Structure formats: C-alpha cells, structure tokens
Image: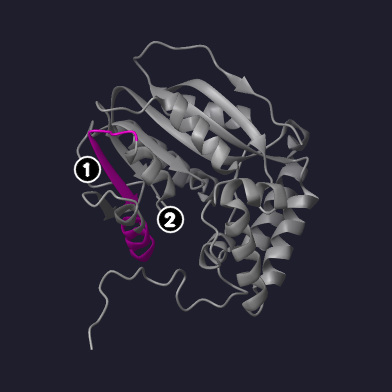
Amino acid sequence: MTTRTDAAPLIAAGLDVHKMPAHWLMARLGKRVLRPGGRETTRWLLQHADIGAADDVIELAPGLGHTAAAILSRGPRSYTGVDRDAAAGRCAELAIERAGFPHVRVIHADAGSVPLDDGSATVVMGEAMLSMQTAASKHAILSEVHRLLRPGGRYVIHELALTPQADDVELRASVQADLSAAIHVGVRIGTLDDWVTWLQDAGFVVEDVMQAPMRLLEIDRLIADEGVIGATRLILNAVRTPGAAGRLLDVRRAFRAHQFHLCAVGLIARKTGSAQAGSDLVSCTH
C-alpha cells in the first residue's frame, strides 16, 4: 500500500462543526473565496497594486492559496507565503502547486515576527487577517510589514470594516461581539477612517481605497465568487454535513443583522518616503 504524501491536511482537524471558526468550516465545505469583499475586491487590489516582474511579494496568511495563484500569474520575481498555522500553510502550498506554480514556499511563522531580512519585499499582501487581531497584535504586524518592505514598497490589505453608521462606541462593541459569537473568532475592526489611521500611524501613506458590501454568504455573492457549480457544491456539502447548514445560517443571520454596519475595505498603502498619490475611493453600497 502506498501512502499519499501530497494530500492536504484536513482543515480544522479535530474541531466540532459547532465550534470551529466559520471561515474554516466554509473552507471544509468547499468555499474557495473567504474574503469579506469577495473575488471582486481582491481583483481590484491586485490590479491597482500593479505587481510585476520586479516585485518580491510576501503574502501573510495565504489561506487556501487562491490569491497566491493570482499573484503568481502576474510573474513576480519571488513569492513567499507566511502562515502561523502549519496545516493551513501546507494547504496553501499544495493549492499553489496544483495551480501550476511548484517552486514557491510558505513558511511557518507568526505575522508579527517573520524570519526574513529587513527589506525583503516590495509588496506585502494580507487579506482578512488583521480584522481578527487585538490592537497589540495589529501594531506588531503593521510594524513587521514596515520592516519587511523596502522604501516605496506597497502594503495591500483586504479587511472587514464598520460603516459610518456604526461609529458609536456601544454599537461598535455590539456589532463586534455579535460577529465574534457567530463566527467563533474575535472580531476587532474599525471604520475606514480607523483603518487609514492605523496604517498612517505605522508609517504608511494610503494611496488607494475601495469599499464593497459585506455579502459573503448571500446567493449573488456566492455565485460571483464560486460560480454556479461551486455555490451549489457548497450548499449541498452543508446540507450533507450534520450541523453545518445551521452554523452557516447563524453566521448569515449575524451578517444580515448588521448589514448596514459592515462593509469590506481594500487599501493600498506605501511605505513612507515615496510620493503620495491621490486616494481613489469606491463607495460602499448595500
């Protein structure tokens, strides 16, 4: 009997469906796009980041490897993924290899302490990972990104945000508590202005901004992100997996309850010292 050595580790192995983080449950059920603004926001970020042959790219928390494959299709000089979860990193590495890019590496490390030299990258990208960090962890990661980037390097992020309608201390706390309870991961987010301020305080100049509705589990977004076949497969897998459909409905209810308080943001920032461009804002609509 031969043993497969190229099989991806089971996502969230050992965790009960009712307890595992919602993004890993969705991934186990076959969802490929797990970003709050969907495939459209990632595509916009890659286009405006203008990644090309002269770039050395670091991606933090590459997830299922789909953004990595899109980055690599643009032909950068180098690509390195960084993931603190060894199993998730291996999943990303295998997905990247299967997409036709076998000579890549995903290293096992925390985003706040990456074992790479100063100025290792011209581009650092991270999606849907800062939103789940404490203020101290955000600061550590932003500082580390600044260290990793060369002067003029671009930091590209895609995160969950609060709309101006939620710019109230009590409401903000309620939204984050409700989401944290539903997805089983701590949610710590701010408004677009907050995200810009956090980046500026870390030594970045924000050049481009996009906002999009947060509709991760709505049918139209599922089809746009996964295609009809992929969306159908996800729904069927949820129905067939005990407890999964109920979990997804609970998560969607939490998103819908705060649909006017949430959106996705994509930001491209440059390490201080480069010329500042005008901000390109695309409004968040529902």
Q: Judge by depth and name the residue closer to the eye, 267 or 186.
A: 267
Give, as a single range, the part of the protein colored magenta: 74-94
**Residue, disc 1:** 116
Q: Is residue 75 above or below residue 278?
A: below
Left or right relative to 157: residue 38: right
Q: Position of residue 191 (x, y in %)?
A: 65, 34
Q: Position of residue 47 (x, y in %)?
A: 45, 27
Q: Judge by depth and name the residue closer to the eye, 48 or 134.
A: 48
Which residue type carries mark 2? Leu
| Residue found 70% across the figure and 31% down from its top | 284
| Residue found 45% across the figure and 46% down from its top | 137
Quarter of the picture containing the N terminus is: bottom left
Alpha-carbon span between mark 1 and mark 2: 22 Å
**Residue, disc 2:** 64
Left or right relative to 92: residue 27: right
Can residue 236 be seen in the rendering of this structure? yes
Residue 124: quarter of image: top left
Can residue 216 be seen in the rendering of this structure? no
Residue 79 belongs to magenta span: yes
Q: How many marks?
A: 2
Q: Secondary structure at mark 1?
A: loop
